[in-house]
């Protein structure tokens, strides 16, 4: 595994990364302060992480070098979640697989996944390319998110749909006291 201490250029202060984490493109990673990345995290994309983020065990982020996962501050991604920043559409217009020559490949969809401040992903959620998880929005356990969310709204189901709104006042006040406007 990586000696994360060598990567101070992309790794902030108070960062704990388990020895059983695999980041296939560390040169495309930027990690903020106060971060915990747990056992079994796998990432093959560009990765930008703000401050106060927890990535729970067995989370995977796929999509290759062109893919991007952008995580703002005060966010948790819970166990077993899958974030698909890019991949084949399985439309039948070509062959699928990473070693297929480009002229024979199926259509690809590659688009960033963005988690805005105070948002969250519960356990075993699947998020597809192009989703923008709005400030304070949460995706409930076992859900499949195929589109972007509205701020301070809880989503659940397959496909994920809004089920209720969420308070914002306490979280915003605490963040402000910590120096985050």
Image (cartoon, grey):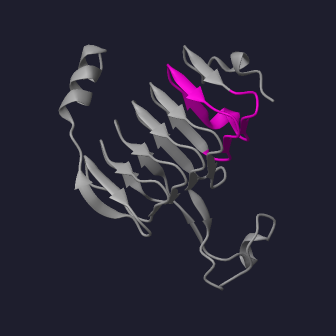
* Residue 27 place in picture, x, y as percent: 67, 33
Instruction: Kindly identify the residue that appears in the image at 74 percent across and 79 percent down.
Output: 95
Q: Where does the N terminus fall, quadrant-wise? A: top right
Instruction: Kindly identify the residue that appears in the image at 72 percent across and 35 percent down.
Output: 21
Camera-side residue: 95 or 154?
Answer: 154
In the picture, measured across the screen, residue 124 lies left or right of residue 100, that is: left
Instruction: Kindly identify the residue that appears in the image at 29 percent across and 15 percent down.
Output: 179
Q: Where does the C terminus fall, quadrant-wise? A: top left
* Residue 72 place in picture, x, y as percent: 41, 35
Eyeballing the image, is 72 above or below 160? above
Camera-side residue: 103 or 158?
Answer: 158
* Residue 53 place in picture, x, y as percent: 48, 30
| Residue farthest to the bottom, as pictured | 92
Eyeballing the image, is 133 above or below 88? above
* Residue 160 place in picture, x, y as percent: 39, 64
Instruction: Kindly identify the residue that appears in the image at 57 percent across and 26 percent down.
Output: 36
In the picture, measured across the screen, residue 122 lies left or right of residue 90, that is: left
Camera-side residue: 5 or 139?
Answer: 139
Q: Quadrant of residue 146?
A: bottom left
Camera-side residue: 93 or 119?
Answer: 119
Image label count:
0
The boundaries of the magenta stretch are 18-45
In the picture, measured across the screen, residue 58 lies left or right of residue 1, that is: left
> Is residue 94 located in the magenta-colored stretch of the structure?
no
């Amino acid at each position: 595994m990586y000696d994360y201490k060598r990567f101070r250029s992309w790794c902030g202060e108070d960062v704990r990364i388990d020895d059983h984490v695999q980041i296939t493109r560390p040169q495309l990673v930027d990690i903020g302060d106060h971060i915990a990345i747990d056992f079994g995290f796998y990432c093959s994309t560009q990765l930008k992480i703000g401050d106060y983020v927890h990535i729970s065990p067995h989370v995977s982020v796929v999509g290759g070098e062109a893919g991007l996962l952008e995580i703002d501050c005060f966010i948790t991604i819970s166990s077993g979640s899958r974030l698909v920043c890019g991949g084949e559409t399985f439309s039948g217009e070509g062959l699928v697989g990473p070693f297929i020559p480009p002229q024979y490949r199926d259509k690809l969809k590659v688009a960033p996944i963005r988690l805005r401040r105070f948002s969250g992903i519960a356990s075993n959620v699947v998020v597809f390319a192009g989703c923008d998880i709005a400030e304070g929005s949460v995706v409930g356990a076992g859900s499949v998110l195929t589109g972007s969310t509205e701020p301070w709204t809880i989503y659940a189901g397959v496909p994920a749909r809004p089920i209720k709104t969420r308070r914002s006042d306490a979280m915003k006040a605490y963040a402000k006291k910590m120096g985050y406007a």
